[in-house]
Each structure stands twice: as structure tokens, then as C-alpha cells.
Image (spheres, rainbow, N blue to C red):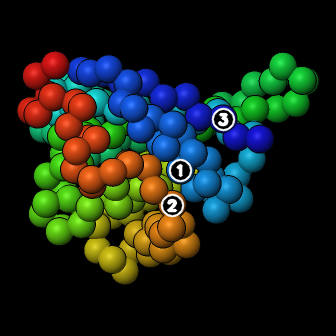
Amino acid sequence: MNRVALTVEEAPLPVWSGGVKRYALKALDAIGRDNWDLSIMLCGDKTIQALNARYRGKDEATDVLSFELGAEESGEDGGRRYLPGDIVISLDTLRENALYFQTSEDEELRRLLIHGILHLDGMDHRTNDDTEPMIVLQERILARLKEERILTGAASAPVEELPQGGDG
């Protein structure tokens, strides 16, 4: 059984946070992973820019970062648990991506979650070209889970629970 922990920086926990966890669990199932303890943080551009500068030497905001841990530990039941690492998603940049790519914020959030999970599963890409094997798999999983939704109601309203510009 997989587990997902969700935290936020720069704002309170969104009302749709349960949808993030449910979707991440479905994405893990889609790639055949079990006994993962996945950590996800939602934040604004201020937080992700600081992380990107510190850990990647890029002093700019980005949409998603994955910090691979790749450790195993014993679970409460004596079984092995896998700690893949952390996914950090900027909801500010997610909004910008959705506008730029003319897609819903819900679809962009689902895409970024899958992208982060695939990185933690050991995949990588040199470009964002849609022929890259990781990007092909990402889009295949997105299509497979196309009926799933994270955000409820209007596509843009729920994401605005984080302050615009990351000034929280």
C-alpha cells in the first residue's frame, strides 16, 4: 500500500488537498509501485525559487522539483517501505503553465504530479520534447487517468487559495 504526505508553504492547506493525494496514489498504481511513502509539497514561486537556487544553482522559479531520496526502511508491520523522496510544485508557475499551454489548472497539476513521480522513479529527460521517453510515458499515464480530477468546481478558482506571486 502506498502512502502520500502533503504539506504546503506560503498558504493554508487547500480544500482540494485530498484530491492531490488520491491522484498521486493512482499515478503510483499506474506505474506499478507499491509500499512507497511519497512526500509532496505545494508552494508558491518564492519557495520553489529558493529551493531551485539552493539545490540546482538556478535562481528562478520553476514548476516542479523532485528531490530523490531512494531509501528503504522498516514499516510498522515489519515490511519494507520505500522513501522515494519529495516532489515540490509551485502553484504560481502551474497557473502560468496552464495559461501558456492553454490547458486547465487541474490537468497541469496532474501532469506535474506524474512528472515528479517519474523523476523519483529514476527517469530523466534532457529536453521537454514530446518524443523524450519520460515525457511520452508521462502523457500516456495522464491519458490513462484522464477521468480523474484533483480540483473541484471551476478549474481556476481552487488554485487561488495560494496567494498570487508567492507573497504569503
Using the image, tell me which numbered label, if any, was put on residue 23.
Answer: 1
Q: Which residue is drawn at 48% across and 69% down?
A: 146
Q: Is label 3 or label 1 in front?
A: 1
14 relative to 141, above or below: above
Q: Residue at x 26, y 61 (%)?
A: 104
Q: Is label 1 or label 2 in front?
A: 2
- Residue 94 horizontal/vertical position (percent): 23, 49
- Farthest bottom residue in view: 131
The alpha-carbon separation of the residues under discs 1 and 2 comes to: 7 Å
Instruction: Name the quadrant containing residue 87.
Output: top left
User: For mark 2, what is the residue?
Assistant: 148
Say which amino acid is labelled 3: Arg
Mark 2, secondary structure of its residue: loop
Q: Which residue is drawn at 66% across and 35% down?
A: 3
Q: How crowded is mark 3: few (under 14 residues within 10 Å), some or many (20 or more)?
A: some
Q: In which quarter of the image is the C terminus?
A: top left
Contact check, label 2 and label 3, Cβ < 8 Å: no
Whether residue 68 can be seen here: no
Q: How crowded is mark 1: few (under 14 residues within 10 Å), some or many (20 or more)?
A: many
Could you tell which of marks 1 and 2 lies nearer the N-terminus? 1
Say which amino acid is labelled 2: Glu
Using the image, tell me which numbered label, if any, was put on residue 3.
Answer: 3
Instruction: Name the quadrant containing residue 32.
Output: bottom right
1 sits to left or right of 152: right
Could you tell which of marks 3 and 1 lies nearer the N-terminus? 3
Mark 3, secondary structure of its residue: strand
- Closer to the camera in the image, 79 or 43: 43
81 sits to left or right of 68: right
